[in-house]
Amino acid sequence: MNAHWTASNSSLEIHSMPFYWRLSSGTSPVNGIDSRLAIKITANVQHDYLRFIPTPDQWTVINEAYKKNANIGFLNPESGQMQTYGASVNNFFLKEIKRFEPRLPVEIGCGAGFSIQFLKKHGYDVIGVDPSEYSLHWSERLGFRLINDFFSKDLLDRRPDFVYCNDVFEHVSDVEKFSSMVFECLDDNGVFCIATTNSTRSIQLGDISMLEHQHVNMFTDRSILLILGNAGFTDVSITSGSYGNTFHITAVKRRSDFRDSSSLQSLNTHKPSLCEGYFQRAEQAIKSFEHYYYSSSHNNFVCYVPLRCIPYLSCVGDFGKARILDSNAAWHGKYIDGYSRPIEKIDDICGTKGEGRVFVGSLTFFDEIRDGLVAHGYQEDMIKSIELLA
């Protein structure tokens, strides 16, 4: 047993990790929302994905955060992602809507409604479904139609022929039930489009950078096929987003679809399980990070992409010793709850360039970040990802 984390053949627990739900101008906590929570992940063996099952107390904290006007987890002007990740998912949904030309498109978990506004500019009228006060505020501000409630298969008075969701699949506590509800509510030949996180490479490596309290599910391409096939979909395509490491998924409910074992036979689900052995790989990855971390002084240890570094820093009990950097200008000078240092930009560390070690938490953007650091004088052999350490 380690001081800050525990691993077994079937689970991994970090005993205390910053709860990343907002960026703020200081370190003052929000009443009723803990700045740090434990996180324990296990594997869903049947559908081959990793999951975090929050305790009732943890769900209370997470649900309280969902009610706030947060700037993490939603596409809005404060996120700094409207022209990057936001553009990628919006263009995906637009492409599929143009392809299928639905009469009644619906977005589940529409948040601030920026995908709805984007599609409206292209001539498509979308109904939003979201239970949050946050979404209600934005629907009144932007004037889009919102059903301010949790999604259920009988929520709509007409059967939609196109349902889509972005940054929802990884947040849903029972993703199998959710997928089945969408299947049942869809009209024949209806379409279900999903943009969600792709954790395939991280699971293969034993990487823990994708751990986040709000992301209760971590998927591989195989798990997506298994989950949607179990729900009844027999026509599923999976592609990669143009920005970041995301799945763009399109599933069609053919008129002949029915939910039994034969529905899975038409999907390519016969790949080896990726989650098998994950916790042993994760234990080795954490130990490799520990060795790298303790080989440098705290002030000369820099972490790039804070969201992806926080799980590793939590495993060594670091809640504010290492400097944290990000390329997103909207985040500079802001604080993550539970971490006492602000997020810096690369120019802020010029005085220590070449003197310390850098850990880059993102596998997706590692090459780009490494090249930028080298251009600022850092030695390439002092810049590591978990893939290079493990």
Image (cartoon, grey):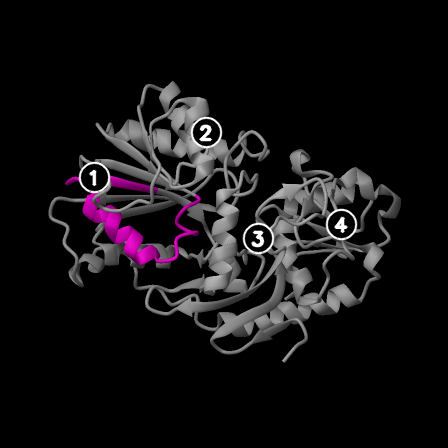
**At 42% across and 30% down in the image, what residue appears?**
115
Residue 114 in view: no
User: The disc labelled 1 sits on which kind of residue?
Assistant: Gly
User: The disc labelled 2 sits on which kind of residue?
Assistant: Trp
Where residue 110 appears, as percent x and y from the top left, is: 40, 36
Q: Nearer the viewer, mark 2 or mark 1?
A: 2
Q: Give the residue pinned by disc 2.
A: 138
What numbered label is drawn on residue 239?
Answer: none
Ranked by sequence position, the earlier of labels 1 and 4 is 1
Q: Give the residue pinned by disc 4.
A: 341
Using the numbered discs, state the Cα–Cα distance from disc 1 to disc 3 in whole angstroms. 41 Å
Q: Residues within 10 Å of mark 1 (few under 14, many from 20)?
A: many
**At 46% across and 57% down in the image, what residue appears?**
216
Q: Nearer the viewer, mark 2 or mark 3?
A: 3
Stretch in magenta: 167-193
Q: Give the residue pinned by disc 3.
A: 32
Reply above or below: 248 against 292: above
What numbered label is drawn on residue 190?
Answer: 1
Query: Which image quadrant for residue 290?
Result: bottom right
